[in-house]
Amino acid sequence: MVAVSGIFSNAALAEKADHWSIIHAGTLMADARKKVTSAQSIIVKNGKIYDIRAGYISPSDLPNVKNANIIDLKDQFVMAGMIDSHTHVTGQMAPHSREQAVTTTNSEYALIGSVYARRILNAGFTTIRNVGGPREAVFALRNSIRKGQILGPRIVAGGLTISPLGGHGDNNGFRPDVFGKPHSGICNGADDCRRAVRDQIKYGADMIKYVATGGVLSKIATGTGQQFTDAEQAAIVQSAHAMGRKVAAHAHGKGGIDAALRAGVDSIEHGSFLDKGSIKLFKKTGAYLVPTLLAGATVVDIATNKPGFFMPEVAAKAKAVGPIMAHALYAAYKAGVKIAFGTDSGVSVHGINGQELVLMVKAGMQAKDVLISATVSAADLLDRTATIGTLEKGKSADIIAVSGNPLKDISTLLHPTFVMVRGVVAVE
Ligand SMILES: [Zn+2]
C-alpha cells in the first residue's frame, strides 16, 4: 500500500502539470466479454485512460511527455476495477447495531464510512452503489471521494430507503419517543410515496432504493412478503424515472418480486423466492438481478453459530432465506436473466466483497459471466457505461490487478495486488 498524501497535498499544483502513468500489463482483460490480450500498455493521463497500446511503451514514445510513472504489472492479470451494486458503507452489522442506531450521529457515520469505503476499495472495488443509509453521511462521503479529498471507491448513492411505515426500511422495535417521527423515506399511499422519492432526489440521491417486501434483518416479524401495494410501487418507480433516477427494489418473496418487476424497476435485490413466472417478467422488462449471496451466507452462519446475535424473529428469517438465494441465482442465470454483482456489504464485513465472486461460481455461474456481472453489467445497471466497466480510451482509470487468472481461479480476486481509482494508486 502506498501513501496518497503526496498526491492530494499537491492538488493545487495538479492543474498546471499533467499527470501521466504507463501501466505495463502482462495479461489484459480490457472488456470481460472479450478475449484477453498480452503485453499491453495502458496510458493514464490525469485520472483517465488516454490510450491502450500493444507492447510495453516508455514515456519517450509519447510526444511532449517528459515524466510518467511506470507501473510494472508484466507478471499480473489486469482488468477494470470491480463494481459492487449493493453496499451499506456507513455501517456494519454487529450485535450492538440497535444501540448504534440511536447513538451514532451523521458525522460519525460519514467518518466510519470513509474507513469502510477504503477497505472496499482495497479489495478491488472501485465503484459501489450504496443502497440505503444515513443520507447526509453517504452524500458527504460520495462528494469528498469525488473531489479527491479522501481516497475511496466512486459512490453512486441512494438516499434513505423508501419503505412503508413499519416495513423493512423503517426503524422498528423502539419506543415511540425514540424514533417517533418516521424518516423522509417512509411513505403510505401512492402520492406520499412520490413525495418520499422526490425528497431523496432533492437532497442528492443518484438512485432510489425501495423495499418491495419484508426483510431478513428488520426487527419485526412481518415476514418476507409483499408490503407496498402495486399502486405504491408504480408511483415510486414512475416518479424516480421521471427525474432520471434508476430504481432498485429489495425483494425476497415472489409476490413482491413480481410486483416490483411489473412496476418497472431496474433491479431486484436478493430475489430469494423468484420462480418461473418471475423469470419471465425479468426477461420481459430487462431488469437485473443483484443476488447478494454473501449476505445470505453471512446471516445463515450467524444464525447457526452465534446464538443470541440475532433476535429470534430475525434468526428464523435468516435460516429460511439464506440457503435458497444460490438456487434463485442459478435458475435466473440459466434462463438468461441479466445479473449484476452485489454483496450487501455491511451485512457482511466490508472488504471481503470478493467472496461474492466465489459464491457465484459455486452457485453455478461461469467465471467469465461472474466477471461480466462485476464490471460491464454493473456499470450498465448504474448508468455509468461511459465511465466505468471496461478499460477503454476516455474512461476512468479504475484498474486492478491480480497474480493469478480469475477466469481459471476466481479466488485470485480475493487478493488484488494493485488497485487504481481515478488514476490514483490505492494498492500496489
Ligand atoms: Zn441491503
Image (cartoon, rainbow, N blue to C red):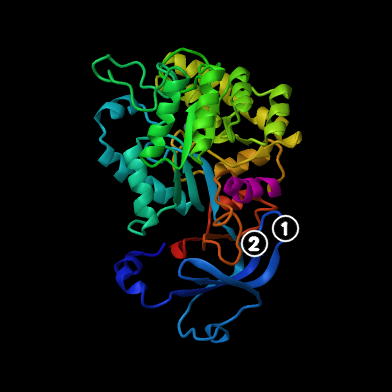
Does mark 2's beta carbon lie closer than 8 Å to ligand 1?
no
Q: Residue at x 57, y 56 (%)?
A: 386
Give the structural element (helix, strand or loop) at label 2: loop
**Residue 242 % position (x, y):** 51, 36
Q: Nearer the viewer, residue 1 or 221?
A: 221
The quadrant in which the N terminus is found is bottom left
**Residue 133 % position (x, y):** 39, 35
Q: Nearer the viewer, residue 145 or 305?
A: 145
Q: Nearer the viewer, residue 54 or 211?
A: 211
Looking at the image, do the residues carrying marks 2 and 1 touch, with CB atoms under 8 Å apart? yes
Rendered image: mark on residue 30 = 2
Rendered image: mark on residue 122 = none
Q: Quadrant of residue 23?
A: bottom right
Q: Quadrant of residue 138?
A: top left
- Amino acid type at circle 1 is Lys
Q: Is 386 contained in the magenta span?
A: no
Q: Which residues are magenta?
A: 368-380
Q: Residue at x 60, y 47 (%)?
A: 380
Relative to 144, residue 225 above or below = above
**Residue 392 % position (x, y):** 61, 64
Relative to 294, residue 373 above or below = below
Does mark 1's beta carbon lie closer than 8 Å to ligand 1?
no
**Residue 272 in view in this figure:** no
**Residue 131 % position (x, y):** 46, 36
Rendered image: mark on residue 34 = 1
Q: Is 379 contained in the magenta span?
A: yes
Task: Tell me the chief SS of the magenta region.
Answer: helix
- Amino acid type at circle 2 is Ala
Relative to 339, residue 72 above or below = below
Cα distance between the residues tagged 2 and 1: 8 Å
For residue 388, side relative to residue 206 (left or right): right
Give the structural element (helix, strand or loop) at label 1: loop
